Image (cartoon, rainbow, N blue to C red):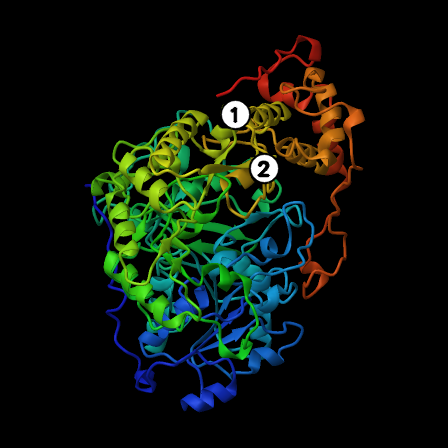
Amino acid sequence: MIKRHKTAKQLFSYPLYWAECYGISPFLPTTREEMDALGWDSCDVIIVSGDAYVDHPSFGMAVLGRLLESKGYRVGIIDQPDWRNTEDFMRLGRPNLYFGITAGNMDSLINRYTADLKVRNDDAYTPYGVGGKRPDRAVIVYSQRCKEAFHDVPVMIGGIEASLRRIAQYDYWSDEVRRSVLIDSTADILLYGNAERAMIEVTHQMAMGKTLDELTDIRGTTIVRNSPPGGFTEIDSTRVDWPGKVDQIYSPYEYIPEGKCQTKDGEESDVMPIRVIPAPLRRGEKLDPEKTYIRLPSFEKVSKDPVLYAHTSRILHLESNPHNARALIQKHGKKEIWVNPPPIPLETPEMDGVFDLPYARVPHPKYKKARIPAYDMIKTSINIMRGCFGGCTFCSITEHEGRVIQSRSHESILKEIEDIKDKVPGFTGHISDLGGPTSNMYTLNCNDDEVQASCRKLSCVYPTICSNLNTDHSPTTQLYRKTRAVEGIHTVSIASGLRYDLAVEDPEYVRELVTHHVGGLLKIAPEHSEKDTLSKMMKPGMGTYDRFKRMFDKYSKEAGKKQHLIPYFIAAHPGSSDEDMLNLAVWLKTNDFKPDQVQTFYPSPMSLATAMYHSGKNPLKPVTYKSEDVYTPKDAKQRTVQKGFLRYHDPSNWQDLRNILVKMGRTDLIGHGDHKLVPAEDKDKQTHRRPQKAKPGQATGASHTSNRPTMEKNAAAEKARRKNSHGAKPASSRNTGETANPAKRRKTKIKAR
């Protein structure tokens, strides 16, 4: 039996809470004085955030706060509290229902540290851009402080920091696998993804008198259990190497009729699964996905076994489609982390309702004229969609927002333009962006509900665009035309990332974009030029880039505009050998690109590329101890050299590049002339400076030492890394299968693509 799309209760259909009589607040209160002015004696929900409070739909605290307010709840905001004591967490008093904790729009560690673990001096989500206004691992610290302030008040955690740490995850900053943040924070429940559905349901149930202990099966939530629930079948996926024949994954929509599976006599149905089936040894059993969960390897195992970690990462990503995902369970000591299936995506009327809420669209008045850089960046931009089906392994957007695209209506977007005209001080008529995670996935989804309901693909566009994917950009093209026609609007820019592999499928869209919405430069992200590395990123080859560039140049010429593409690339990504980076540098030189801002791979929690980085295995395929190994440059020197290839034109990188070119047997690229990558040593103009890393114990804004990232490495691990990077076989030959003798290597040809 094939079930089609799952549905959910309409987001705005919940009954109003009694406090709706207080009406709408100009701003959600942040002090007792503001509460008094509104006539409130208490808050029903208090949201604690690491960001400054900006009442704008691009800020999570504002979205969820205004949504709860629309259902009658009194919501207060504690923004960027002083975490060194509990006083600031008590400033709004005791909430009637719960505390909602978020680190903010960014992960607190990514916000604080660069990919090279250097401390950032600024924070775009803080007045005046001042750094250090939130602790490292803010979700943990804020949650613990709320528990200290009011020990019996439930704590809910969410936002991207909690979402990407819902199970055991590799932590780049401490170089270890950490427990689920739900355990470390001592919170009661975790909401992952865009949490409107889960938050409304949890709040409604609590307002009706239920406790969080009773709310065990709400989609988009993660909880702690003492044992598995009764009435379920467990798929045991705690091992990777099993004896015997391994069958293909059965359809999750085939099920056993009621009565076929029963608990054994004497078992407690509320704590015991029906039975346990080893994942690779099942024989096409017909199981009800609503009564099936997958057991992941325990925290204790994945923290010690990187291969099991990669295996776990693969399972998590395969169980991300809300229409067929099953619950996951992972043991942490004597406790069980239970991850309910992802939330059902919002329908267009629900998306419109969320963005049509009465946002003030400006920072809270208490900041006066203080500049908040993140607000300045987005104050005239409009989010038209959510989600991403690209599946890029280095990106965590999909793990947070999901693969199903959720789009707003044209009417709602045009209404927001009118709000911007009315509410944004000094608006000049320039809409800075119409986009989201991508600029051109608006309304694009699977053409077949039945196919989408059963699909477990990690990407809809890799290795090729799925034949079931709608690639018609006409709704986006029509939207662009409508926004340009709004009175008082003179420019509409497109600043969100462009999926050019999708854009080339609709030339009319490319013409519209290039003619009217590019201000001279368009940023796109090929990320790399080499097939082996691109396969680990799940990104298209450079042939697609070349095709888009021809279209871009053609339509720019037709419009009488001189415009250029600005490609973005990543260094030191898993799978990227020194030879791959050399070939990319040659491509950049041949095409006369001199990137100023380049990025080194940043292992963010839960991404597939991070699993590759930590484990040395490829979770894009079934993982075993003998499966494909993935080389990753981890040593600081290796990462610096690979980044230097992207900035081959910078004199500070020349000496490092000369050294590596000598080791690679490519001295033919050193010297003077168009076909040389770096000049000879006599052309150096400045001294090479190496980046400085954060030192152990350096002041970072963390609340206590155990929560600070550290650069201290286990001696044995460091020795193994050095052996890996400086052993008998150089990196390039390890990854390509070529001989270690430089003299016998095939020389990279310099040619235009």
* Residue wearing tag 2: 595
Disc number at residue 168?
none
The vertical placement of 493 against 42, above or below, is: above
The vertical placement of 99 against 268, above or below, is: below
Q: Nearer the viewer, mark 1 or mark 2?
A: 2
Task: Identify the residue at image location x=59%, y=53%.
Answer: 110
Q: Is residue 166 at least partly visible in the picture? A: yes
Q: How many marks?
A: 2
Q: Which class describes the residues within 10 Å of circle 2: few (<14), some (14-19), or many (20+)?
A: some
- Tag 1: residue type? Glu
User: Helix or strand or loop: what does disc 2 sit on?
Assistant: loop
User: Helix or strand or loop: what does disc 1 sit on?
Assistant: loop
Q: Quadrant of residue 512?
A: top left
The vertical placement of 283 against 409, above or below, is: above
Task: Identify the residue at image location x=51%, y=87%.
Answer: 32
Task: Identify the residue at image location x=43%, y=30%.
Answer: 545
Q: Quadrant of residue 599?
A: top right
User: Which is nearer the N-term, disc 1 or disc 2?
Assistant: 1
The one of 589 and 115 positioned closer to us in this rendering? 589
Residue 611 rendering spot, x and y as whole percentages: 54, 39
Horizontal side, residue 439 vs residue 451: left or right: right
Q: Which class describes the residues within 10 Å of circle 1: few (<14), some (14-19), or many (20+)?
A: some
The one of 424 and 98 positioned closer to us in this rendering? 424
Horizontal side, residue 141 vs residue 680: left or right: left
Query: What's the CA distance linking mark 1 and mark 2?
Result: 18 Å
